[in-house]
C-alpha cells in the first residue's frame, strides 16, 4: 500500500545560496532548516547531462504554517538563467504560491521593505485577494489567502501554499495531478483573460486556468503544518507554441526546479505510477542520507509535459540536531499527524538574522 500526503516542498535553483535563503527568511519566513548541506547529486545525473554535480541544498520551512522550500545552489557550476524570457503558459513551474493570513498587510510589508512587488492587490477568479512579487533571482511568487495555521509568530506570511504549472493540455495533466496525486477538487476552472495577471509576462493573453486542491486529504506527519495546498494548471489558448522552462538547461539552474510530494510506501507507489505511464525517471533505490540525522528515499517522475516531480518518503529527520534528537517517521502510521510538541520543537533550529 502507498499514501500520497500532498505537496511537501517547492524546489528552487539559485546562484547564491546564502543571499537567496536570507530573502526567503525575511519575506516568506522560511527560517527553520530540516537540513542544510553540500553534497554530490548523483540522483540527478539524468537531468544534468549525465555528469554528477555538487550543490548546497537546504530544506527550510515556516513554523507558522505552509509547505517547505528546497533552496538549491550548485557548487560545481554557476546556476544561470534561461536565454529566453519565459511567460505564462510555458511548460513547467512558473509561479510559487505563498500563504498569508492577511494579503493586504503582506502587500504593505513587501512594499515597505523594498521587495520587487509587480502588482497591486487584485482578485483571483474565485474572488481571493492576491498580488505578485519577484525574488532577487527573478522567480515569481503569488501571495494567496490562508486560514489554517499551526502557530502564531512574527512573520507576515506563512510558507509555500503550492504553485502554478504551465501545461499543453489540462485534461491530460489532470491524469497525473488529479487522478494519481490526489488534487481532484476544482476550486475554479476559467478560460478568459485575467486582471491579476496583467503585469506578468504574457499575462494579457487568453488562458484556461484550473485551480486544484485535495478533495480528501490523507493526513500524515506534517498535515498540521502544511494546511491546504494548491496546484494551478495553466494552458495558453492561442497559436503560440509554449516552450519548456528548462529547455537547454539543467536541474539546479535558476528557476523552480521541481515540486516535491510527501509519500509513504514508495515501492508500491512506483508500481502504480509505472502502470499509469509515469514511471520513476531516477530513484535512490534505498535510504539516502542528507546529513547525519536526515534519511529519506527520493524518486523523480515527470508530468505529461516533462515537469519534474520529486517524491520523498521520509524515514528520519532531526528535531534538535545539536542535541541528537531526531524523529523516526518510518515507524509511525502513515496517516498519523506528528504531535504538536514535536513540530514545535523545530523552533530550536531557527536561523535568526
Image: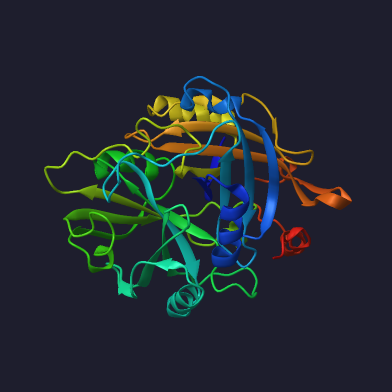
> Can see residue 63?
yes
Image coordinates for residue 104, horizontal then vertical, percent: 43, 79
Which residue of the protein is positioned furthest toward the right in this rendering? 323
**Does residue 261 lie above or below 187 as drawn?**
above
Residue at x 54%, y 66% (from the top left corner): 27
**Quadrant in which the N terminus is drawn:** top right
Residue at x 70%, y 46% (from the top left corner): 35
Image coordinates for residue 340, horizontal then vertical, percent: 72, 64
**Colour style of the rendered protein structure:** rainbow
Q: Is residue 287 left or right of residue 27?
A: right
Q: Nearer the viewer, residue 155 or 38?
A: 38
Q: How many marks?
A: 0
Image coordinates for residue 335, horizontal then vertical, percent: 62, 50
**Quadrant in which the C terminus is drawn:** bottom right
> Can see residue 222?
no
Image coordinates for residue 261, horizontal then vertical, percent: 52, 44
Q: Quadrant of residue 55?
A: top right
Which residue of the protein is positioned furthest toward the top in this rendering? 50
**Does residue 129 lie above or below 170 as drawn?**
below
Q: Nearer the viewer, residue 328 or 331?
A: 328
Amino acid at each position: 500500500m502507498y499514501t500520497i500526503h500532498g505537496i511537501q516542498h517547492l524546489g528552487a535553483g539559485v546562484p547564491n545560496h546564502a543571499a537567496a535563503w536570507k530573502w526567503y527568511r525575511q519575506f516568506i519566513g522560511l527560517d527553520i532548516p530540516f537540513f542544510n548541506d553540500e553534497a554530490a547529486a548523483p540522483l540527478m545525473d539524468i537531468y544534468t547531462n549525465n555528469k554528477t554535480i555538487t550543490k548546497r541544498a537546504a530544506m527550510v520551512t515556516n513554523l507558522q504554517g505552509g509547505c517547505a522550500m528546497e533552496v538549491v545552489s550548485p557548487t560545481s557550476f554557476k546556476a544561470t538563467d534561461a536565454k529566453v524570457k519565459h511567460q505564462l503558459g510555458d511548460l513547467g513551474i512558473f509561479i510559487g504560491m505563498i500563504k498569508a493570513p492577511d494579503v493586504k498587510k503582506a502587500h504593505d510589508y513587501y512594499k515597505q521593505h523594498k521587495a520587487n512587488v509587480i502588482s497591486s492587490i487584485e482578485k483571483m477568479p474565485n474572488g481571493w485577494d492576491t498580488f505578485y512579487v519577484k525574488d532577487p533571482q527573478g522567480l515569481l511568487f503569488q501571495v494567496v489567502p490562508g486560514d489554517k495555521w499551526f502557530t502564531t509568530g512574527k512573520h507576515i506570511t506563512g510558507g509555500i501554499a503550492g504553485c502554478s504549472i504551465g501545461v499543453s493540455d489540462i485534461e491530460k495533466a489532470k491524469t497525473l495531478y488529479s487522478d494519481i496525486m490526489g488534487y481532484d477538487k476544482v476550486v475554479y476552472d476559467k478560460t478568459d483573460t485575467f486582471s491579476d495577471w496583467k503585469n506578468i509576462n504574457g499575462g494579457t493573453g487568453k488562458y484556461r486556468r484550473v485551480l486544484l486542491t485535495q478533495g480528501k486529504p490523507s493526513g500524515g506527519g506534517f498535515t498540521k503544518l502544511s494546511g491546504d495546498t494548491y496546484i494551478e494548471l495553466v494552458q495558453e489558448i492561442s497559436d503560440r507554441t509554449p516552450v519548456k522552462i528548462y529547455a537547454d538547461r539543467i536541474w539546479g539552474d535558476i528557476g523552480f526546479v521541481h515540486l516535491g510530494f510527501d509519500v509513504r510506501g514508495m515501492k508500491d507507489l512506483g508500481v502504480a505510477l509505472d502502470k499509469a505511464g509515469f514511471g520513476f525517471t531516477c530513484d535512490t533505490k534505498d535510504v539516502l542520507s542528507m546529513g547525519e540525522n536526515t534519511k529519506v528515499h527520493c524518486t523523480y517522475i515527470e508530468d505529461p509535459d516533462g515537469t519534474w516531480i520529486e517524491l520523498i518518503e521520509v524515514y528520519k529527520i532531526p528535531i534538535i540536531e545539536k542535541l541528537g534528537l531526531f524523529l523516526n517517521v518510518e515507524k509511525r502510521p502513515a496517516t498519523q499527524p506528528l504531535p504538536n510538541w514535536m513540530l514545535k520543537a523545530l523552533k530550536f533550529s531557527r536561523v535568526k538574522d
